[in-house]
Amino acid sequence: MKSRGGMSEYVVRRRIVLGLFATAFVALVWRAVDLQVFNQDFLQNQGDARHLRVVTLAAHRGMILDRNGEPLAVSTPVDSVWANPQELATGREYWSALAKILQLDPDQMRRQLEARSEREFVYLKRHVDPTVAAQIRSLGAPGVALQREYRRYYPDGEVTAQVLGFTDVDDVGQEGLELAYEDWMRGESGAKRVIKDGKHSIIENVESIRPARPGRDLTLSIDRRIQYLAYRELKAAVQQHKARSGSVVVLDTTTGEILAMVNQPSYNPNNRSHLKPSQIRNRAVTDLFEPGSTLKAFTVACGLESGKYRPETQIDTTPGFYRVGSNLVRDVHNYGPLDVVGVIRKSSNVGSSKIALSLDKEMFWNKLHQLGFGTVSASGFPGEASGLLVNYRRWRIFEQATLSFGYGMSATPLQLAQAYGVLAADGEMRPASFLKLDKAPRGERVFSQRTAREMRLMLEEAVGPDGTAPAARVSGYRVGGKTGTVRKSIAGGYADNRYVSVFAGFAPSSKSRLAIAVMIDEPSNGDYYGGKVAAPVFSAVMAGALRLLNVAPDALEKPDVPTAQHVALGGQL
Amino acid sequence: MKDPGLLLPLLVLAVIASAIGVVYSKHLSRKQFVELQRLESDRDEMNIEWGQLQLEQSTVATHGRIEELARLHLKMTMPDPNVVVIVQP
């Protein structure tokens, strides 16, 4: 009985154990199937999320180079300090040291971190010095890390400030050529997927999501040497004459390239903490002024082109004023009868009005339009002003007369330099360019070669001893140009004591290479005539630029230029 | 096929050998990858240094600074026009 009962008990026990095993086995199989089949995607993702990382491949912004390959703007890596507030909260003892190194107000930093305690990323300070970055690294505060970013540096500072513009904290162009060529210079950061180990070091590249594309370099037409020279001379003149502002534009007339463009007042683009909006403006392309007498060169050129005038044609400017409709055109003196050369040399308003009124309106307007007045130049500079040139259909007779001596219209210094470049380039207009060109673009003919050459000879007279601007001369070179002393228009008329001094010209006259326009706004230290204020700047910049570009002198026949023999002897003595 | 008793151990050995091969080539590829990472970061560092040197050169060679050094430090002046000899071809 006992043994039988024991046997049956054993069988039952065996069944129970087997049943339990079977249940456990089924449960295990089920769990395996559940994990491997039903939850596979979720688990795979979770696994990947723990060691697969997407890392960005930084791409820096292209450099801006001058025409000789010298850097004008360079992006260089700097470190930004960021923190994970949740992790940093565990190391409060580091906070005061951190604030000290970063030169932050400790209370403000604490408030900032506490306000963002739910986040995982907050910038503590962007773009710190390498020494600060090293200190942060050695401090080893929890949750604080450095991030590599790029910052733009401009070695020439204020000399190139307005032309180049600047970039913001993320190295995106905001002003000037930085803005205009943003797409060209911008680098596109890439991304790749990697496997990282527990120490956050990359152990395997999984795939490249997109390759990094570094920004392309931009080669400008600017010549750093001429740019500096022009800036130095302009700054000296603006200070000497206590002027409000000023601009100089230097053009290569054989190609239309802008070799220099400078403005006063300027700013340091590397430290923009005290920046005023008026300093950012590239006045050479945004600020309009009435070009005044500098426009007479084109009135006379149109007169020559019409065939009605020759350089020796007599024009009577007596008695020094001229009634046009109900208004009067006045000269400074009564110049009496002048030939056309004399109208330029003496800068006679009466003479140029008489020429303008005898011209066909449409032809006169067309020529001025072709010279680039009243239209935005091809330079592509952001915010460039077009200037005002009223359509000839709306001209009244007095407007036609005042236009001939540059009132009732407006232009930028760049437009003025470009128009004088046409006379210098034998009558052909080439679009202004900020970029270095491989070959000269085809010019568009505005004036005949003969007209341009005759005009150049006349404009040489204007800087001659009897002209309005002998101060514009450059020793060793034949120079031509025209002054302008423009009364500023104010509400209700023209101001009595506020002037714009202008000079525009070219050299060497026999085989032109450069055209320069100088504009100085409101000189207020006594002198205000273009011949006294703007012409000396023109002369100094022209002399230096011609020497830098190795342009051969074309006026060496003067007896006071020593021969090699004289100097050799002088050197021995 | 004639002697299945010998084939099985051979296959087992081949599998083990290939497994060790896989491990070894994986190891090599990791090593190469670490080397690649190091070289790439070297390259980036050098690029950065090159950019900084360029910037430094450009800053040191600023025309304003050169002019100041030449005029004040070295007492250089522009030659007077009448001592300049222009050699014409």
Image: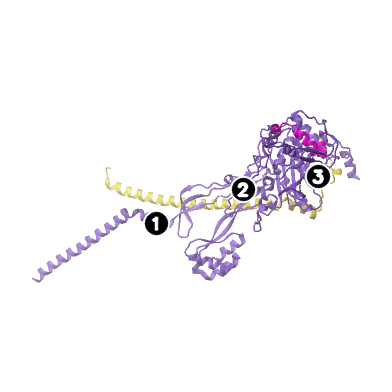
Chain colours: A purple, B yellow
The 10 Å Cα crowd at callout 1, few under 14, some 14 to 19, many 20 or more, is: few
- Camera-side residue of A236 and A308: A308
Q: Which portion, as a residue range, is magenta?
A: A342-364
CA gap, disc 2 and disc 1: 44 Å
The Cα atoms of the two marked residues, 3 and 2, are separated by 36 Å
Question: Which residue ends up furthest to the front in the rendered image?
Answer: A326
Dividing the image into 4 quarters, which one contains the N terminus of chain A? Answer: bottom left
Q: Name the N-terminal-most of marks 2 and 1.
A: 1
Contact flag, marks 2 and 1 (Cβ < 8 Å): no
State yes or no: residue A347 in magenta.
yes
Labels 3 and 2 in the same subunit: yes
Q: Which residue is mark 3?
A: A531
Q: Is residue A125 above or below residue A358?
A: below
Q: Amino acid at mark 1?
A: Gly
Front label number (2 vs 1):
2
The nearer-to-camera label among 1 and 3 is 3
Residue assigned mark 1? A47
Could you say which disc has been placed on residue A178 in the image? 2
Q: Secondary structure at mark 3?
A: helix
- Secondary structure, mark 1, is helix
Q: The residue under label 2 is which amino acid type? A: Glu
Q: Chain of mark 1?
A: A
In the rendered image, the residue lying farthest to the top is A307
Residue A309 image point, x, y percent = 78, 30
**Main secondary structure along the magenta-highlighted residues:** helix
Could you tell me if residue A193 is visible in this image? yes
Decide which of A208, A223 is in the foreground and name it. A223
Chain bearing tag 2 is: A
Assess disc 3: are there few (<14), some (14-19) or many (≥20) residues with their C-alpha within 10 Å of its C-alpha: many
